[in-house]
Image (cartoon, rainbow, N blue to C red):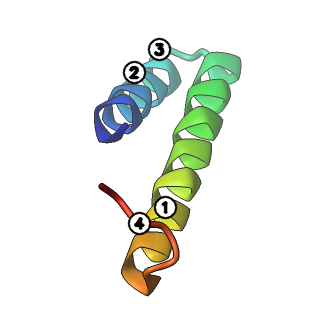
Amino acid sequence: MIKWIIILLIVAAAASLLGMPALAGAAAMGARVLIGIVLIIFLLIVLGVFAVT
């Protein structure tokens, strides 16, 4: 999932440099959502609520 976040951030940066604000916004929003999901899963693992086997 971290790989997808990095890819989306690179796409957002390239699109903003090339003058495509809609694509940059969509890629940035996708990265933001994935970062939120990763943080929630990380917190659940740290607090011991979500057991990984």
Query: Which residue does the image show at 38% across and 80% down from the upper left?
Result: 46
What residue is at 66 percent from the left and 26 percent from the top? 26
Can you identify the residue that label 4 sits on? 51
Is 53 placed left or right of 44 in the picture?
A: left
Which residue has dot 1 on it?
41
Distance between mark 4 and mark 2 Cα atoms: 38 Å
Q: Give coordinates of residue 22: x percent, y percent.
A: 71, 20
Residue highlighted by disc 2: 14
Disc 2 residue type? Ala
SS at circle 2: helix
| 1 vs 2, front mark | 1
Which sits earlier in the primary sequence, circle 4 or circle 1?
A: 1
Examine the image and state in which quarter residue 47 appears: bottom left
Kindly identify the amino acid type of the residue bearing the numbered disc 1. Answer: Ile
Quarter in which the C terminus is drawn: bottom left
- Decide which of tag 4 and tag 2 comes sooner along the chain: 2
Q: Earlier in the sequence, mark 1 or mark 3?
A: 3
How many marks are shown on the rendered structure? 4
- Work out whether residue 31 or residue 17 is closer to the camera in this orientation and state it: 31
Give the percent coordinates (x, y) of residue 13.
41, 30
Under circle 4, the secondary element is: loop
Residue furthest bottom as drawn: 47
Q: CA distance from mark 4 to mark 3?
A: 43 Å
Q: Amino acid at mark 4?
A: Ala
Residue 5 point in image, percent of width and height: 40, 37
| Distance of label 4 from label 1 (alpha carbons) | 10 Å
Residues at discs 2 and 3 in contact (Cβ within 8 Å):
yes
Q: Residues within 10 Å of mark 4 (few under 14, many from 20)?
A: few
Query: What whole-number distance in Å separates the C-alpha atoms at marks 2 and 3?
Result: 6 Å
